[in-house]
Amino acid sequence: MEQDSKTELGLKQYLLGQLTAEDRQQLEEELAKSEEDFEQLLLAEEELVDEYVSGTLSEQEVERFERHFLTTPGRHLKLQSVRALRRYTDEHPPVSFWARVSQQIRQDGSVVNGMSRPRQLLRPAIAVLALCFGSFWGVRLWQTALPIYQAENLLKQNYRVYMEGSPRPSGGYQVTGESVLMSPTGPQARNAYLARALDLVEEASANGADADKVHEVRARIFLIQGNLEEALKELKLIGATRSDTASVLNDRGVLHFKEKAWLESEKYFEAAVKQDPQFKEAWYNLALVRAQLGKKTEASSSLDQYLTLEADPSWKNAALELKKKLAGN
Protein backbone atom coordinates (compact mmCIF):
# COMPACT_ATOMS: atom_id res chain seq x y z
CA MET A 1 0.00 0.00 0.00
CA GLU A 2 1.62 3.26 -1.10
CA GLN A 3 2.02 6.12 1.31
CA ASP A 4 0.05 8.79 -0.58
CA SER A 5 -2.85 11.04 0.35
CA LYS A 6 -5.33 8.83 -1.46
CA THR A 7 -4.32 5.80 0.62
CA GLU A 8 -4.41 7.77 3.87
CA LEU A 9 -7.86 9.08 2.99
CA GLY A 10 -8.99 5.55 2.15
CA LEU A 11 -7.82 4.24 5.52
CA LYS A 12 -9.58 7.08 7.29
CA GLN A 13 -12.79 6.39 5.39
CA TYR A 14 -12.45 2.69 6.23
CA LEU A 15 -12.12 3.39 9.94
CA LEU A 16 -15.12 5.71 9.82
CA GLY A 17 -17.24 3.19 7.89
CA GLN A 18 -17.45 5.34 4.75
CA LEU A 19 -16.13 2.91 2.12
CA THR A 20 -18.37 0.94 -0.22
CA ALA A 21 -18.66 -2.79 0.42
CA GLU A 22 -16.45 -3.51 -2.60
CA ASP A 23 -13.71 -1.07 -1.54
CA ARG A 24 -13.87 -2.28 2.05
CA GLN A 25 -13.48 -5.89 0.98
CA GLN A 26 -10.53 -5.06 -1.28
CA LEU A 27 -8.80 -3.12 1.50
CA GLU A 28 -9.34 -5.87 4.08
CA GLU A 29 -7.91 -8.47 1.70
CA GLU A 30 -4.76 -6.34 1.37
CA LEU A 31 -4.54 -5.86 5.15
CA ALA A 32 -4.79 -9.60 5.77
CA LYS A 33 -1.93 -10.34 3.37
CA SER A 34 0.55 -7.57 4.20
CA GLU A 35 2.09 -6.74 7.57
CA GLU A 36 3.24 -3.39 6.17
CA ASP A 37 -0.31 -2.46 5.15
CA PHE A 38 -1.63 -3.45 8.56
CA GLU A 39 0.99 -1.26 10.23
CA GLN A 40 -0.29 1.64 8.12
CA LEU A 41 -3.79 0.95 9.40
CA LEU A 42 -2.55 1.14 13.01
CA LEU A 43 -0.89 4.47 12.23
CA ALA A 44 -4.12 5.69 10.64
CA GLU A 45 -6.00 4.77 13.84
CA GLU A 46 -3.52 6.82 15.89
CA GLU A 47 -3.87 9.81 13.55
CA LEU A 48 -7.67 9.57 13.57
CA VAL A 49 -7.79 9.60 17.39
CA ASP A 50 -5.39 12.55 17.40
CA GLU A 51 -7.58 14.46 14.93
CA TYR A 52 -10.63 13.78 17.09
CA VAL A 53 -8.90 15.02 20.24
CA SER A 54 -7.51 18.05 18.36
CA GLY A 55 -10.98 18.96 17.09
CA THR A 56 -9.98 18.92 13.41
CA LEU A 57 -12.60 16.38 12.26
CA SER A 58 -15.71 17.64 10.52
CA GLU A 59 -19.09 17.40 12.27
CA GLN A 60 -20.02 14.37 10.15
CA GLU A 61 -16.65 12.71 10.84
CA VAL A 62 -17.08 13.26 14.59
CA GLU A 63 -20.48 11.57 14.45
CA ARG A 64 -19.09 8.59 12.54
CA PHE A 65 -16.03 8.42 14.80
CA GLU A 66 -18.25 8.12 17.88
CA ARG A 67 -20.70 5.70 16.26
CA HIS A 68 -18.46 3.49 14.09
CA PHE A 69 -14.94 3.78 15.46
CA LEU A 70 -15.47 3.84 19.23
CA THR A 71 -16.99 0.37 19.35
CA THR A 72 -14.45 -1.45 21.56
CA PRO A 73 -13.06 -0.85 25.07
CA GLY A 74 -9.57 -0.82 23.56
CA ARG A 75 -10.33 2.17 21.37
CA HIS A 76 -11.98 3.99 24.27
CA LEU A 77 -8.83 3.38 26.35
CA LYS A 78 -6.65 4.65 23.53
CA LEU A 79 -8.76 7.82 23.33
CA GLN A 80 -8.48 8.38 27.09
CA SER A 81 -4.69 7.93 26.96
CA VAL A 82 -4.30 10.44 24.13
CA ARG A 83 -6.51 12.96 25.93
CA ALA A 84 -4.54 12.62 29.16
CA LEU A 85 -1.21 12.99 27.37
CA ARG A 86 -2.51 15.98 25.37
CA ARG A 87 -3.64 17.75 28.55
CA TYR A 88 -0.25 17.25 30.14
CA THR A 89 1.81 18.36 27.14
CA ASP A 90 -0.39 21.47 26.76
CA GLU A 91 0.51 22.46 30.32
CA HIS A 92 4.14 21.27 30.24
CA PRO A 93 5.98 21.55 26.89
CA PRO A 94 8.07 18.39 26.22
CA VAL A 95 11.27 20.41 25.73
CA SER A 96 11.23 21.48 29.36
CA PHE A 97 10.61 18.03 30.83
CA TRP A 98 14.16 16.98 31.85
CA ALA A 99 15.11 20.55 32.73
CA ARG A 100 12.20 20.72 35.17
CA VAL A 101 13.15 17.39 36.76
CA SER A 102 16.78 18.45 37.15
CA GLN A 103 15.79 21.82 38.59
CA GLN A 104 13.40 20.20 41.06
CA ILE A 105 16.08 17.81 42.32
CA ARG A 106 18.58 20.67 42.77
CA GLN A 107 16.02 22.68 44.74
CA ASP A 108 15.06 19.80 47.00
CA GLY A 109 18.41 18.10 47.36
CA SER A 110 16.30 14.95 47.35
CA VAL A 111 13.21 13.96 45.43
CA VAL A 112 11.59 12.90 48.69
CA ASN A 113 12.07 16.22 50.51
CA GLY A 114 8.47 17.34 51.11
CA MET A 115 5.23 16.18 49.54
CA SER A 116 4.23 18.88 47.06
CA ARG A 117 7.30 18.65 44.83
CA PRO A 118 7.30 14.85 44.49
CA ARG A 119 3.76 15.20 43.22
CA GLN A 120 5.00 17.69 40.63
CA LEU A 121 7.69 15.22 39.59
CA LEU A 122 5.14 12.45 39.40
CA ARG A 123 3.18 14.18 36.66
CA PRO A 124 5.98 14.15 34.03
CA ALA A 125 6.78 10.56 35.04
CA ILE A 126 3.18 9.64 34.28
CA ALA A 127 3.55 11.26 30.86
CA VAL A 128 6.58 9.07 30.13
CA LEU A 129 4.65 6.02 31.26
CA ALA A 130 1.81 7.02 28.95
CA LEU A 131 4.23 7.12 26.02
CA CYS A 132 5.58 3.68 26.96
CA PHE A 133 2.05 2.43 27.30
CA GLY A 134 1.28 3.72 23.81
CA SER A 135 4.12 1.65 22.35
CA PHE A 136 3.02 -1.40 24.32
CA TRP A 137 -0.55 -0.90 23.15
CA GLY A 138 0.59 -0.80 19.52
CA VAL A 139 2.24 -4.22 19.88
CA ARG A 140 -0.81 -5.65 21.65
CA LEU A 141 -3.06 -4.24 18.92
CA TRP A 142 -0.90 -5.96 16.30
CA GLN A 143 -1.13 -9.29 18.11
CA THR A 144 -4.89 -9.09 18.61
CA ALA A 145 -6.33 -7.14 15.68
CA LEU A 146 -4.44 -8.85 12.84
CA PRO A 147 -5.81 -12.37 13.53
CA ILE A 148 -9.33 -10.92 13.73
CA TYR A 149 -8.87 -9.19 10.36
CA GLN A 150 -7.51 -12.40 8.88
CA ALA A 151 -10.44 -14.43 10.22
CA GLU A 152 -13.00 -11.97 8.84
CA ASN A 153 -11.19 -11.89 5.51
CA LEU A 154 -11.27 -15.70 5.29
CA LEU A 155 -15.05 -15.57 5.67
CA LYS A 156 -15.38 -12.87 3.02
CA GLN A 157 -13.22 -14.74 0.54
CA ASN A 158 -15.03 -18.06 0.94
CA TYR A 159 -18.58 -17.59 2.21
CA ARG A 160 -21.42 -16.72 -0.17
CA VAL A 161 -25.05 -16.04 0.72
CA TYR A 162 -27.58 -18.01 -1.33
CA MET A 163 -29.84 -15.41 -2.95
CA GLU A 164 -33.02 -17.51 -2.77
CA GLY A 165 -34.48 -16.26 0.52
CA SER A 166 -31.36 -16.47 2.69
CA PRO A 167 -30.71 -13.71 5.28
CA ARG A 168 -27.47 -11.74 5.17
CA PRO A 169 -25.15 -11.97 8.20
CA SER A 170 -23.20 -8.80 8.97
CA GLY A 171 -19.86 -8.62 7.21
CA GLY A 172 -20.42 -7.64 3.57
CA TYR A 173 -20.56 -11.14 2.07
CA GLN A 174 -21.13 -11.80 -1.64
CA VAL A 175 -24.23 -13.42 -3.10
CA THR A 176 -24.51 -16.62 -5.13
CA GLY A 177 -27.25 -18.28 -7.14
CA GLU A 178 -26.12 -21.73 -5.98
CA SER A 179 -27.35 -23.30 -2.78
CA VAL A 180 -24.82 -24.98 -0.49
CA LEU A 181 -26.09 -28.39 -1.62
CA MET A 182 -25.50 -27.51 -5.29
CA SER A 183 -22.12 -25.87 -4.74
CA PRO A 184 -19.10 -27.66 -6.26
CA THR A 185 -17.14 -26.81 -3.10
CA GLY A 186 -17.28 -29.85 -0.86
CA PRO A 187 -18.11 -29.79 2.85
CA GLN A 188 -14.49 -30.61 3.72
CA ALA A 189 -13.24 -27.42 2.06
CA ARG A 190 -16.00 -25.36 3.68
CA ASN A 191 -15.22 -26.76 7.10
CA ALA A 192 -11.50 -26.12 6.59
CA TYR A 193 -11.79 -22.35 6.13
CA LEU A 194 -14.30 -22.05 8.98
CA ALA A 195 -12.01 -24.05 11.27
CA ARG A 196 -9.07 -21.84 10.29
CA ALA A 197 -11.15 -18.71 11.00
CA LEU A 198 -11.99 -20.07 14.45
CA ASP A 199 -8.30 -20.78 15.09
CA LEU A 200 -7.42 -17.18 14.24
CA VAL A 201 -10.11 -15.86 16.57
CA GLU A 202 -8.79 -18.10 19.36
CA GLU A 203 -5.27 -16.76 18.72
CA ALA A 204 -6.53 -13.19 19.05
CA SER A 205 -8.43 -14.09 22.23
CA ALA A 206 -5.36 -15.74 23.78
CA ASN A 207 -3.37 -12.53 23.10
CA GLY A 208 -5.95 -10.42 24.94
CA ALA A 209 -8.22 -9.25 22.11
CA ASP A 210 -11.39 -7.35 22.91
CA ALA A 211 -13.75 -10.01 24.26
CA ASP A 212 -16.87 -8.57 22.65
CA LYS A 213 -15.26 -8.55 19.21
CA VAL A 214 -14.14 -12.16 19.72
CA HIS A 215 -17.68 -13.23 20.66
CA GLU A 216 -19.12 -11.36 17.67
CA VAL A 217 -16.83 -13.01 15.12
CA ARG A 218 -17.22 -16.43 16.74
CA ALA A 219 -21.00 -16.05 16.57
CA ARG A 220 -20.82 -15.18 12.88
CA ILE A 221 -18.72 -18.27 12.14
CA PHE A 222 -21.21 -20.46 13.99
CA LEU A 223 -24.08 -18.81 12.07
CA ILE A 224 -22.38 -19.71 8.80
CA GLN A 225 -21.80 -23.25 10.05
CA GLY A 226 -25.46 -23.53 11.03
CA ASN A 227 -24.53 -24.13 14.66
CA LEU A 228 -27.27 -21.90 16.04
CA GLU A 229 -26.93 -23.02 19.65
CA GLU A 230 -23.27 -21.98 19.84
CA ALA A 231 -23.98 -18.79 17.88
CA LEU A 232 -26.63 -17.78 20.41
CA LYS A 233 -24.25 -18.46 23.31
CA GLU A 234 -21.64 -16.17 21.79
CA LEU A 235 -24.14 -13.41 21.00
CA LYS A 236 -25.41 -13.46 24.58
CA LEU A 237 -21.85 -13.02 25.89
CA ILE A 238 -21.40 -9.71 24.05
CA GLY A 239 -21.37 -6.81 26.51
CA ALA A 240 -23.84 -3.96 26.64
CA THR A 241 -21.51 -1.48 24.90
CA ARG A 242 -21.55 -3.57 21.72
CA SER A 243 -24.72 -5.66 21.92
CA ASP A 244 -26.86 -2.82 20.56
CA THR A 245 -24.71 -2.11 17.49
CA ALA A 246 -26.38 -2.65 14.12
CA SER A 247 -24.07 -5.52 13.18
CA VAL A 248 -24.82 -7.53 16.33
CA LEU A 249 -28.56 -6.78 16.19
CA ASN A 250 -28.60 -7.91 12.57
CA ASP A 251 -26.86 -11.19 13.43
CA ARG A 252 -29.36 -11.80 16.23
CA GLY A 253 -32.09 -11.34 13.63
CA VAL A 254 -30.36 -13.77 11.24
CA LEU A 255 -30.20 -16.39 13.99
CA HIS A 256 -33.93 -16.12 14.74
CA PHE A 257 -34.68 -16.12 11.00
CA LYS A 258 -32.87 -19.44 10.67
CA GLU A 259 -34.97 -20.70 13.58
CA LYS A 260 -38.09 -19.50 11.73
CA ALA A 261 -38.95 -17.27 14.69
CA TRP A 262 -40.24 -14.59 12.33
CA LEU A 263 -41.56 -12.04 14.82
CA GLU A 264 -38.44 -12.16 16.96
CA SER A 265 -36.31 -11.89 13.83
CA GLU A 266 -38.27 -8.86 12.59
CA LYS A 267 -37.79 -7.15 15.96
CA TYR A 268 -34.00 -7.40 15.73
CA PHE A 269 -33.82 -6.26 12.11
CA GLU A 270 -36.00 -3.25 12.93
CA ALA A 271 -33.71 -2.42 15.85
CA ALA A 272 -30.67 -2.69 13.56
CA VAL A 273 -31.95 -0.21 10.97
CA LYS A 274 -33.05 2.13 13.75
CA GLN A 275 -29.56 2.01 15.21
CA ASP A 276 -27.95 2.57 11.80
CA PRO A 277 -30.27 3.55 8.91
CA GLN A 278 -27.37 2.94 6.47
CA PHE A 279 -26.93 -0.72 7.47
CA LYS A 280 -28.04 -2.33 4.23
CA GLU A 281 -27.87 -6.00 5.29
CA ALA A 282 -30.54 -5.34 7.92
CA TRP A 283 -32.84 -3.62 5.37
CA TYR A 284 -32.57 -6.61 3.05
CA ASN A 285 -33.21 -9.04 5.89
CA LEU A 286 -36.14 -6.98 7.11
CA ALA A 287 -37.72 -7.38 3.66
CA LEU A 288 -37.16 -11.15 3.80
CA VAL A 289 -38.77 -11.62 7.20
CA ARG A 290 -41.69 -9.33 6.40
CA ALA A 291 -42.30 -11.42 3.29
CA GLN A 292 -42.39 -14.51 5.50
CA LEU A 293 -44.97 -12.76 7.71
CA GLY A 294 -47.12 -11.90 4.69
CA LYS A 295 -46.39 -8.17 4.97
CA LYS A 296 -45.79 -7.69 1.26
CA THR A 297 -46.23 -3.92 1.18
CA GLU A 298 -43.85 -3.38 4.10
CA ALA A 299 -41.38 -5.87 2.60
CA SER A 300 -41.38 -4.01 -0.72
CA SER A 301 -40.86 -0.71 1.10
CA SER A 302 -37.84 -2.19 2.93
CA LEU A 303 -36.39 -3.30 -0.40
CA ASP A 304 -36.84 0.20 -1.82
CA GLN A 305 -34.78 1.57 1.07
CA TYR A 306 -32.23 -1.20 0.61
CA LEU A 307 -31.80 -0.46 -3.10
CA THR A 308 -30.86 3.16 -2.32
CA LEU A 309 -27.92 1.86 -0.28
CA GLU A 310 -26.70 -1.16 -2.26
CA ALA A 311 -23.99 -0.74 -4.91
CA ASP A 312 -23.27 -4.40 -5.64
CA PRO A 313 -25.00 -5.44 -8.93
CA SER A 314 -25.54 -9.04 -7.81
CA TRP A 315 -27.22 -8.03 -4.57
CA LYS A 316 -29.31 -5.45 -6.41
CA ASN A 317 -30.46 -8.17 -8.76
CA ALA A 318 -31.41 -10.39 -5.80
CA ALA A 319 -33.47 -7.55 -4.32
CA LEU A 320 -35.21 -6.86 -7.64
CA GLU A 321 -36.06 -10.54 -8.03
CA LEU A 322 -37.60 -10.53 -4.56
CA LYS A 323 -39.64 -7.42 -5.46
CA LYS A 324 -41.02 -9.23 -8.50
CA LYS A 325 -42.11 -12.17 -6.35
CA LEU A 326 -43.77 -9.83 -3.86
CA ALA A 327 -45.65 -8.19 -6.72
CA GLY A 328 -46.75 -11.61 -7.98
CA ASN A 329 -44.78 -11.39 -11.26
Image (cartoon, grey):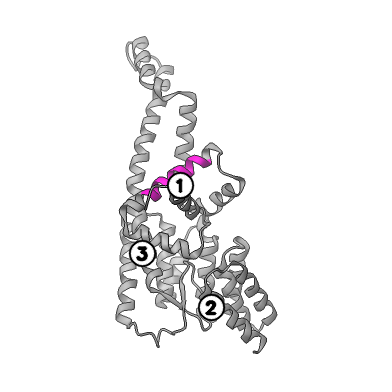
Within-10-Å neighbours for mark 2: few <14, some 14–19, many 20+:
many
User: Is residue 60 shown left or right of residue 73?
Assistant: right
Q: Secondary structure at mark 2?
A: helix
Residue at image location 43% in from the left, 59% down from the top = 213
Within-10-Å neighbours for mark 1: few <14, some 14–19, many 20+:
few
Q: Name which of mark 1 and mark 2 comes first in the sequence.
A: 1
Q: How many marks?
A: 3
How far across and how far down the image is residue 56, in percent?
55, 39
Within-10-Å neighbours for mark 3: few <14, some 14–19, many 20+:
many
C-alpha separation, residue under disc 3 versus residue under disc 2: 24 Å
How far across and how far down the image is residue 100, in percent?
39, 17
C-alpha separation, residue under disc 1 versus residue under disc 2: 43 Å
Where residue 257 is drawn, which disc sits there? 2
Q: Name which of mark 3 and mark 2 comes first in the sequence.
A: 3
What residue range appears in magenta? 40-52
Q: Nearer the viewer, residue 139 or 106?
A: 139
Can you name the residue that lies furthest to the bottom here? 329
Residue annotated with mark 3: 151
For residue 255, say whether it is visible: yes
- Tell me, yes or no, whether the highlighted magenta stretch contains residue 46: yes
Query: Would you place residue 188 above or below residue 112 in this image?
Result: below
Q: Amino acid at mark 1?
A: Ser
Q: Secondary structure at mark 3?
A: helix
Query: Please, what is the dominant secondary structure of the magenta stretch?
Result: helix
Q: Name which of mark 1 and mark 3 comes first in the sequence.
A: 1
Name the mark nearer the viewer: 3 or 2: 3
Q: Amino acid at mark 2?
A: Phe
- Tell me, yes or no, whether the highlighted magenta stretch contains residue 93: no
